[in-house]
Amino acid sequence: MTTQTPIDPRFSRDQQRAPHVEVYWKAVTYKTVIVYVLLALTIITAGVFAMKPDLYQVMLKKIDRAVSDPEMETQAADLKHAKFVNLDGKVQVKKVNSVQWVEADYRTSLDKGDLVQTGTDANARITFADGTTYTVKPDTLVTVEENSTENDKPTSVAMQINHGQVDLATPNWSSPDSKAAVSAEDATAQLHSNSRAAVKSDPEKKESEIVVSSGSAQVQRGQEKIDLAPYEKLTIPKGGPIQKSTVLAPPDLVEPLNLSPITAENPRLYPVHFEWKPIPDAVSYTLRISTTSMFTKTVKEAPTKGTGIDVTGLDPGDYFWSVTATDGKKQTSEVSTIFKFTLVAQGKTQDMVLEITSTQVVGQSAEIVGRTEPGAALIINGQSVPNIAPDGNFRHFTDKLAPGQHTISIIGANRRGGTATKQVSIVVPK
């Protein structure tokens, strides 16, 4: 028995016998495709991590950098460089990868191996990321030897003096293993936290000197190590024995107070009184007044045998002053702490804005909150107020006060010659 496929009357017999292809398909959603792709990527990533775990960490760091704020990253990298914070006179820099000297400015960053050179009447103050400050004195050539200031790690910064003098100051480091050093000839001075020292190198005399003015330091030459306390000095001749001695301490300044305003009807005729505490063994003192904090422009240098002197002939403006002491052996102390004062001409009116908005006792100190004029200078209880906001608002804490009632005096002066005085009473509980 033969079976035939039924003939469709709509088509001819030849058309119905022609070969043809039948196609079958199944619908797949986009969701299913995404799941399969993610599954495949997961398997590949797991395989790569199993074979090369270090590559996985590198990829994560790249992703993190890609999504982070590029400006913040630039700022973080910039914090690892040393920067100029004061420049007076001609200061030049030669980068480690350059053969040319260029003029230094406040945008110049310093790295390991860079050279810094100051002119005859020039000074440069350099601050590292850990807060260590190097002040490069006139006619000095130094090399940045080390600048390791990674986050969450002990910092290590150092400079080499080729010739000249560098003053070094260290902050209160968070890590006791942090280091700050300065080298001269074949000796290296390493300062401890909260310390200051002056280091000199004289190639003509073939010797170097190190004087500690506060804190402590350790000087090493070869296997020899010597500790220095405040106002101790080491003289290190090349090839000769190291000599240790004491030096005269600088005076403590008394008046004018740091950041204090002085108002005078005629500033050039007004006798500005300078005073400091006496130093044992000192037979004379030298007062220096400058219009710059680096003392590159000295307007007055006055020797005196007393501990005070009046100076006239100063124009209105900002001034810096310091004192050195000299003993009977003609030995001169290091420079005292530098104070700043402002001499202003008294205007027709003495009025100025000074408002005290609140006072309260915090522990054994008085908190004074108020408002004054932008750019004004204030003294509260004999203390200068350094942090006055651009809009004139201020908040100040006095030194510790004894239990009992106190009258706090607030004295202000503006640049027009205006002055104002306020008094408030507070009670410190027992």
Image (tube, grey):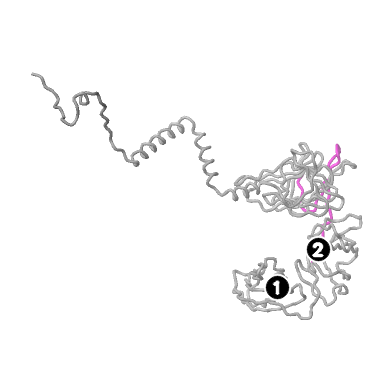
Is the residue marked by circle 1 packed among few (<14), some (14-19), or many (20+) residues within 10 Å?
some
Q: What residue did someone put label 1 on?
A: 381
- Asked whether the viewer can see residue 120, the reply is yes
Task: Name the residue tied to disc 2.
Answer: 320
Q: Amino acid at mark 2?
A: Phe
Q: Look at the image and give the residue range highlighted in magenta.
A: 226-253
Q: Residue shown at 81%/65% (left/top)? A: 319
Q: Give the image location of residue 298, x and y in percent.
A: 86, 60
The verdict on residue 73 being magenta is no
Amino acid beneath label 1: Asn
Which residue is nearer to you in this view: 179 or 12?
Answer: 12
Q: Nearer the viewer, residue 129 or 375?
A: 375
| Quarter of the figure with residue 337 | bottom right
Disc 1 is placed on an element classified as loop
**Residue at the spot x=63%, y=46% of the render?**
77
Q: Is residue 255 above or below residue 48?
A: below
Residue 372 image position (x, y, % from top left) = 67, 74
Element class at badge 2: strand
Asked whether the residues under the numbered discs 2 and 1 touch, taking CB atoms below 8 Å apart as contact, a structural biologist would say no
Q: Quadrant of the N terminus?
A: top left
Q: Where 351 sits versus 141, above or below?
A: below
Binning the other alpha carbons within 10 Å of mark 2 as few (below 14), some (14 to 19) or many (20 upward) gives many
Camera-side residue of 124 and 260:
124
Residue 247 colored magenta?
yes
Report x, y in % for residue 306: 88, 67
Q: Which mark is on residue 409?
A: none
User: For the residues carrying marks 2 and 1, which lies nearer the camera in this image?
Assistant: 2
Estimate the x, y position of residue 115 in percent, counting from the top left.
Answer: 78, 43
Q: CA distance from mark 2 to mark 1?
A: 22 Å
Q: Please determine whether, in this image, residue 386 is positioned above or below residue 217.
A: below
